C-alpha cells in the first residue's frame, strides 16, 4: 500500500499541511474541543502538565507516545489513507 497522507478520523484541518502538522493540529483541535483542562488531559494521558499545557496552546509538541495516549483518551483513531483517495 502506498500512503499519501494520514488523518485522524472525525477531524479535518487544513488541506495543504504536511501529514505531521495535520496530525498535530487535529490532535490539538480535538483536545481543545473536548472541553477538558490541560491538567485533566495530562493526567488521563499519563504525561506532564507543562508539556500538555504547551501543546494545547500551540507552544510545543508532544512526543509520539504521549500523543498516542492523548488520542486514545480523546477516543480518536488514526488511519492511513491510500494514495489517490
Image (cartoon, grey):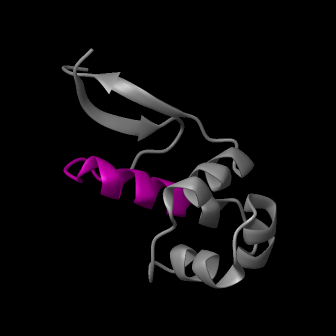
Q: Main secondary structure of the magenta part?
A: helix
Q: Is residue 49 visible?
A: yes
Q: Position of residue 82 (x, y in %)?
A: 29, 19
**Which picture quadrant has residue 80?**
top left
Residue 12 horizontal side relative to residue 84, left or right: right
**Which picture quadrant has residue 1?**
top left
In what quadrant of the picture does the C terminus appear? top left
Q: Nearer the viewer, residue 43 or 29?
A: 43
Q: Is residue 24 magenta?
A: yes
Query: Which residue in the rendered view is the most extreme toward the top?
Result: 1
Q: Position of residue 42 (x, y in %)?
A: 73, 70
Q: Which residues are magenta?
A: 14-29
Which residue is drawn at the image coordinates 61% and 66% (left, top)?
32
Residue 3 horizontal side relative to residue 55, left or right: left
Q: Position of residue 11 (x, y in %)?
A: 49, 44
Q: Position of residue 12 (x, y in %)?
A: 41, 45
Q: Nearer the viewer, residue 30 or 70?
A: 70
Amino acid at each position: 500500500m502506498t500512503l499519501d497522507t494520514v488523518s485522524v478520523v472525525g477531524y479535518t484541518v487544513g488541506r495543504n499541511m504536511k501529514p505531521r502538522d495535520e496530525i498535530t493540529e487535529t490532535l490539538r483541535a480535538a483536545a481543545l474541543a473536548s472541553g477538558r483542562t490541560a491538567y485533566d488531559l495530562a493526567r488521563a494521558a499519563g504525561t506532564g502538565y507543562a508539556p500538555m499545557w504547551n501543546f494545547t496552546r500551540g507552544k510545543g509538541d508532544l512526543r509520539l507516545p504521549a500523543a498516542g495516549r492523548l488520542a486514545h483518551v480523546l477516543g480518536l483513531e488514526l488511519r492511513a489513507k491510500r494514495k489517490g483517495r
